[in-house]
Image (cartoon, helix red, strand yellow):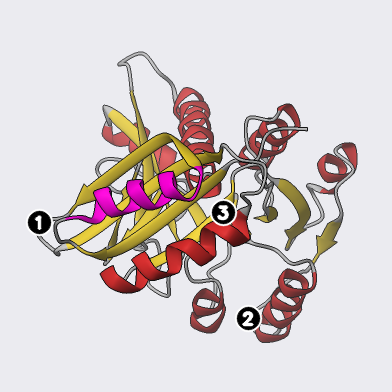
């Protein structure tokens, strides 16, 4: 059995004494800090902190720490949470036909690189069911058309709630979530999309980029909001395009950077490293 370990995350208005108060409280509660990161945003006046700690006495548990910390949190007006560092949050993955991000996430979860339990895979196409079956994960085929979208999303929302899902990952899910579903999943849904420079929209973006001779391609992982592809950015990755690459090489390179950016964003979220700060994020890498 691993020794108990917890992650404290907090945000509040920046003012003197926060770090000292948190450190003193944890020490007096019988805990040892093993990792700490903090940031005060001079533009917004907000302060963010992530602390990983372990109890040094057998009588100290999460409930005891929460009870002791409540007074400090109240004094500084903190929004705070205490997380079990050994937990493996339940994750639902949405996918359409392209399976590179799905396959990457499933492998990383299998080998322990992503601390999560994949509760289910949902797709609007049946193509990725063999991959789900290979990993022994429940697969739900929920096809969608313009007229059936409300019913399909209602079924999806019910599945998310029934399976006690804590995070939804859109791993190349080629459907736009409705405003209602985006609000329902606020702060707990991550999407990935390509970031070609300059931007190419519509069909066959990599072919468009190849024809224009782009020198950089990238990918952006962000939280889902009702503004399409404009949610708070968690992670980005880029790769340089050489002069001798063909369009298939660009497509393959695009798949690679999408996988890397999405996996990092998911890990940062699972490890409680991401803080919303208005329309952007603070990420303690």
Residue 83: give its label: 3
* Residue 169 appears in the rendering: yes
Residue neighbourhood size for the residue with mark 2, other residues' Cα within 10 Å, grouped as few (<14), some (14–19), many (≥20): few
The magenta stretch spans which residues?
17-30
With 42 as the anchor, is 8 left or right in this view? right
Residue 146: give its label: 2
In terms of sequence position, does the residue under pointer 1 or pointer 3 come before the other?
1
Q: Mark 3: which secondary structure? A: strand
Image point (39%, 70%), residue name: 71
Question: Comparing marks 1 and 2, which lies closer to the viewer?
Answer: 1
Image point (52%, 27%), residue name: 252
Residue neighbourhood size for the residue with mark 3, other residues' Cα within 10 Å, grouped as few (<14), some (14–19), many (≥20): some
In terms of sequence position, does the residue under pointer 3 or pointer 2 come before the other?
3
- Quarter of the image for the N terminus: give it: top right
With 47 as the anchor, is 63 left or right in this view? right
With 4 as the anchor, is 251 left or right in this view? left
The image position of residue 165, as x and y in percent, is 70, 63
Q: Are marks 1 and 3 in contact (CB under 8 Å)?
A: no
Relative to 102, residue 278 above or below: below
Image point (34%, 63%), residue name: 230
Residue 42: give its label: 1
């Amino acid at each position: 059995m691993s020794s108990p370990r917890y992650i404290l995350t907090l945000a509040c208005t920046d003012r003197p004494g926060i770090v000292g108060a948190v450190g003193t409280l944890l020490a007096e509660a019988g805990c040892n800090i093993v990792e700490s990161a903090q940031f005060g945003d001079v533009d917004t006046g907000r302060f963010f902190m992530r602390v990983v700690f372990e109890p040094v006495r057998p009588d100290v548990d999460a409930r005891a720490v929460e009870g002791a910390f409540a007074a400090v949190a109240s004094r500084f007006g903190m929004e705070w949470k205490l997380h079990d560092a050994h937990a493996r949050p339940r994750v639902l993955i949405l996918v359409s036909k392209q399976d590179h991000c799905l396959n990457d996430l499933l492998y990383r979860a299998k080998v322990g690189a992503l601390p999560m339990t994949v509760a289910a895979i949902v797709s609007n196409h049946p193509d990725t069911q063999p991959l789900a079956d290979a990993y022994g994960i429940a697969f739900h085929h929920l096809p969608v058309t313009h007229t059936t979208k409300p019913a399909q999303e209602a079924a999806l929302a019910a599945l998310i709630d029934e399976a006690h899902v804590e995070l939804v990952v859109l791993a190349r899910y080629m459907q736009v979530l409705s405003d209602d579903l985006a609000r329902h999943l606020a702060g707990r849904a991550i999407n990935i999309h390509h970031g070609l420079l300059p931007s190419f929209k519509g069909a066959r973006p990599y072919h468009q980029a190849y024809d224009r001779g782009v020198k950089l391609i990238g990918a952006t992982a962000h939280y889902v909001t009702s503004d399409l592809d404009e949610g708070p950015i968690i992670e980005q990755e880029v790769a340089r395009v050489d002069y001798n690459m063909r369009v298939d090489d660009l497509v393959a390179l695009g798949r690679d950077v999408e996988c890397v950016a999405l996996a990092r964003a998911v890990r940062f979220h699972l490890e409680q490293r991401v803080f919303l700060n208005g329309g952007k994020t603070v990420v303690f890498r």
